Image: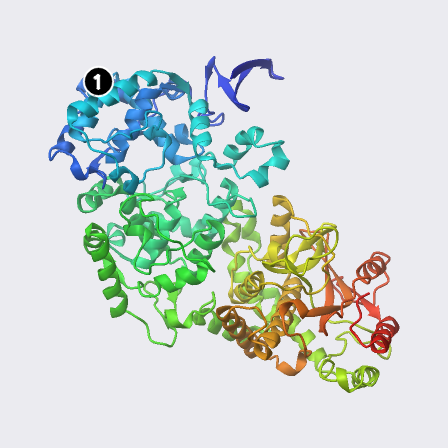
Amino acid sequence: MRQLVCSTRANGLAFCWLAVGGCVFEVKNGRTGVSTLNSDSGLTNSDSVYVDDRLIGLTEYATFCNEDATAQLAKLLSESEWQRLRSVEAADLWECTLVYVELAAIILLFADNPFGSVCEVAKAEWPLELVRRRWEVGCLLERSGALVEKLAKFCVQTLRYMSTPFHWALECLTIPDRVQYASRVRYDAATARAAFQKRAKELYVTLTAPEFIRLWVDRHSIIPKKDLVEKAGGIENSLAHFLAKLKGPLRPLSWVAASTNPKGPYRRTGGSFLRCAHIRTTGHILNRERAREILWDLLGGSLAWNKLDAMKEIDFMACSLAYVELAAIVERVIFQAFGSAAPSLLKKFEAVITDKRIVYAWIGGCILQFAQVPISDLIHFCALDLHYQPSTDYWTLECIRQGPEDIRRERASGDPSVRLTELLAGFQEKMSVTEFAELAALKRRDKATRLRQRASAHRLNENTHTQKPDGPRGVQLTSSHQLNVQFSAARLLAFSTKVKTGAGEDKTGAGEDKTGAGDDKTGAGDDKSGAGDDKNGVVLVGVEKVMRKRKEIDQRMRLHILLLFGAAQTKVCAHIPVNPFNQENNLKRSLVLGGVVMRSSIAGGSVETNTLLLGAIVTCEVFGKTVDLVKAVAPVRPWDSISTLMVDGLKLLENIPDLVVGMPGVEHVDLSTEELDGLHAEVTENWKLRSRIMVIQSDCLHAIDQVCQAHPQTCGVPMDLRGKIQQWLDVFRKDAEWDRSMFPGVEATTMKDLKFAMLGLSRLPGTHVPAILLPELMPWSPDAVLRSLWKDAKARLEAGDCDTKDDEGVMNALVVWDTFKAKVREQAERGCGFSQ
């Protein structure tokens, strides 16, 4: 149903809105549009928008095409038709007959760019590159005046297109799938042409750009339902809101036009979404603003991006296969994410590589290699932000696949960062573009054999090996057998070195050049990684403060508990640490730990013990909401070695099965996108918060490790996960100089039995968030949970009644020792763990 609604702006100009199936789009100058004209661009309806960047070459779909298909494609349009096509105006992109869009989609299966394209300004407001490209070529063909019969004959007789047996299945509304296409029945030319003409009669319908987008969206259901229902009032009404998050270039057109070397081989591009990143259970999408920020920071900010203008043609002639593979993964979602190459250079590559998608992967890899982007950062971007899941097959790479989405292979489970690092470990050496073209042209089995041989020839030694081809930010990978966890030994070694050299450095060096951060907003991340590296020592200082005070064991407290519990409880209480903020003759005590619950559906304040739990939840309060710290902070993109270790620990907690630790009666809520951004910024800048998070996860993982080692048959933790936990703890103990004696002992035999007793609450003031409340707990015996003290401690903090407060406003409200002692006495008298 279509409904036209007219109104008047405040300035008196009339405008209209076209409602199509619940989705609202603007109408410009009496004709419907998809907002293809940027109001600030100065582009008018009569301006020419055509760009002659044709590349005549066939794709992998052209297996059965006539031998002279390339030559016939080059002369498909007559000279008069080419003249009309070149004179296409902005207004010509607003609507098109569906049959031309369908013909365009068919031709684009076999040729990447046979008719040219339109200028960046005209592309700017389209949400997805794949949809835009088909619509754009359809408009060009219709504007040229080429007859439908001629185009259909070319598709059927020359390209030997095989239509789907379903008359309603249009090529313009599908994602290319070579396997599915190869399974179609091949008819003789006359039968195929008659069948296509019969279907084409139903396609003489003029659609507006928004109506075509709506058709595509309805076909693929790309709307992340969980994220947008609340904001837009329902799935139907959220469509425009969703598309608005994706449309437009990722980088401003003013920057694209400001190239310092417009005649060089590198070409600046705006970059645009081909499709949305895979939506996981969080429901959050990688929107345009977030993608622009990440891509800008990946290369190192404005200075590094500007240096790309200095690329020479020789920089595109050899590249590490690891870079090419990561570029291909990014290009699956973001078209020309890092820029492109000059048309003359593209034609050279097209002469040896037939698949344009593979050409763009090679170009992207060369750009990333020139910029010396750390491989580890790219892996995190692909795994965490693009949600890419690698294949289970080591010898299947995206950059040399046989066409778009054509292999429905099994995707590896577990941590994609680990899998990607293992996958790319043997492909660090550079290869020439000729070698790459030969590899891409092989059959699938031959490709696997060649990759296996290459990986074997360059397999690294057991010790960490770092290759730095062009500078200090070269490829950093380790051999696959060392990668039992998602961080490499090289990064852990860097962590150790930075910690030992930076522990006592002057804090003023943490953010050396803050004045430049505001010059270019998109370049604000230039100094972030450096600032984080300089603050490594500062973060460790925060960890060491807790560590040193833990060594001051309060013998009187231990003796008091041992006497109350007797010999039966001595094993449980043998290693209880003292209060790191011990004051007033130990009348009060606390421990900087996190309140932990395991991920499950919590209803009515209790957790069913027979429910399979999916991962740990560290309870905290942010923005006045009870939030899972693991879920909220784990997506933070690491920027240095310590932050990598922190995120790695949180991801290990995400995978612990069937465990309830801490306060199971607390219901945790999800933060909004804006609140999450604020929390992530706070984690990035607040070293005290990071210190406490690292202490939280180390104590939780140590308690879990104790249960796993003592009761491997009943703990319920998979063997591979146990190994990852042990490796994380070994690294942390070594680099932070923690030893096992500082951790309390546990007696639990399963994850369900592992409990934490609450001892206090800490309040950390923030810059990007009002304040963060972290509970202070310690591992205790089965059923030893204090659930009634959170509110009391929070009330004390709100009243300003804190036990300790440092110069930066961190407040600690500790459980009163008399209360703790009374609970212990009550527990001892009952002969079981206390729970209230």
Q: Residue at x 52, y 48 (%)?
A: 280
At label 1, the amino acid type is: Glu
Q: Which residue lies under the disc numbered 1?
A: 149
Q: Is the residue 105 above or below the residue 761 in the image?
A: above
Asked whether, in this view, residue 116 is left or right of residue 415, the answer is left
| Residue 822 image offset from top left, x and y in percent | 88, 73
Give the vertical position of 720 relative to 8 (above or below): below
> Residue lying farthest left?
67
Q: Quadrant of residue 471?
A: bottom left
Report the side of 507 relative to 622 (left or right): left
**Residue at the far front in the pictured view:** 610
Q: Nearer the viewer, residue 540 or 758?
A: 758
x and y percentages locating residue 135 in the rendered image = 36, 26
Q: Nearer the viewer, residue 523 or 119?
A: 119
The C terminus lies in quadrant:
bottom right
Under tag 1, what secondary structure?
Answer: helix
| Crowding at mark 1 (Cα within 10 Å: few <14, some 14-19, many 20+) | few
Q: Where in the figure is residue 543, as x and y percent of width and height?
A: 64, 72
